């Protein structure tokens, strides 16, 4: 899914060995998740703004949950704390 997200903003796929350098582990509410934040190389929004994808993956043996925010680079970066708060607030996972 991370490579699919990267493709949505024109970035090349990562190999499995590259993933640790391009992600970080987080544990909102004690749930281990993989967190990524990637920005396009080129301005994809109206030819003026780079596009950013911020996402988290929570995987259990039975099911995986995917959380993603996409938008203009500066706006998504500025919303990172709120995105992490959202992950912290999730119930029933």
Image (cartoon, rainbow, N blue to C red):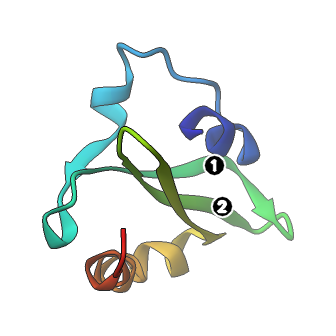
Q: Position of residue 65 (x, y in %)?
A: 49, 56
Q: How many marks?
A: 2
Q: Give neighbour class at mark 2: few <14, some 14-19, many 20+ (Cα, 10 Å).
A: some
Q: Residue at image x 48%, y 58%?
A: 55
Secondary structure of residue under mark 1: strand
Q: Position of 42 compared to 90: left or right?
A: right
The quadrant of the rendering that contains the N terminus is: top right
Q: Please tell me whether mark 2 sits on a helix, a strand or a loop.
A: strand
Image location (x, y in percent) of residue 18: 38, 19
Label number found at residue 40: 1
**Residue 12 relative to residue 84: left or right:** right
**62 and 43: which is toward the camera:** 62
Report, in whole angstroms, how far the alpha carbon at label 2 lies from the one at label 1: 6 Å
Q: Is residue 10 above or below residue 58?
A: above
The residue sitting at 73% across, 57% down in the picture is: 43
Going 63% across and 49% down the picture, which residue do you hit? 40
For residue 34, side relative to residue 48 (left or right): left
Establish if 51 lies above or below 19. Answer: below
Position in image of residue 35 (x %, y %):
35, 52
The part of the image, by quadrant, that contains residue 21 is: top left
- Image mark for residue 50: 2
Residue in the picture at 66% in, 61% down: 51
Q: Nearer the viewer, residue 77 or 86?
A: 86
| Upstream in sequence: badge 2 or badge 1 | 1
Quadrant in which the C terminus is drawn: bottom left
- State whether residue 84 is above or below residue 55: below
Q: Nearer the viewer, residue 9 or 59?
A: 59
The correct choice, above or below, for 30 with respect to 76 in the image is: above
Residue sticking out furthest to the right: 46
Residue 92 at x, y percent in the picture: 36, 76
Q: Does the residue at mark 2 contact the one at mark 1 (Cβ under 8 Å)?
A: yes
């Amino acid at each position: 899914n991370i490579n699919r997200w990267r493709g949505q903003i024109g970035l090349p796929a990562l190999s499995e060995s590259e993933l640790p350098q391009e992600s970080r582990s987080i544990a909102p509410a004690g749930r281990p998740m993989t967190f990524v934040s990637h920005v396009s190389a080129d301005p994809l929004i109206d030819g003026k703004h780079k596009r950013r994808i911020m996402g988290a993956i929570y995987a259990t043996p039975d099911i995986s949950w995917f959380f993603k925010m996409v938008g203009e680079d500066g706006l998504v970066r500025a919303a990172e704390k709120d995105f992490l708060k959202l992950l912290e607030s999730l119930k029933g996972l």
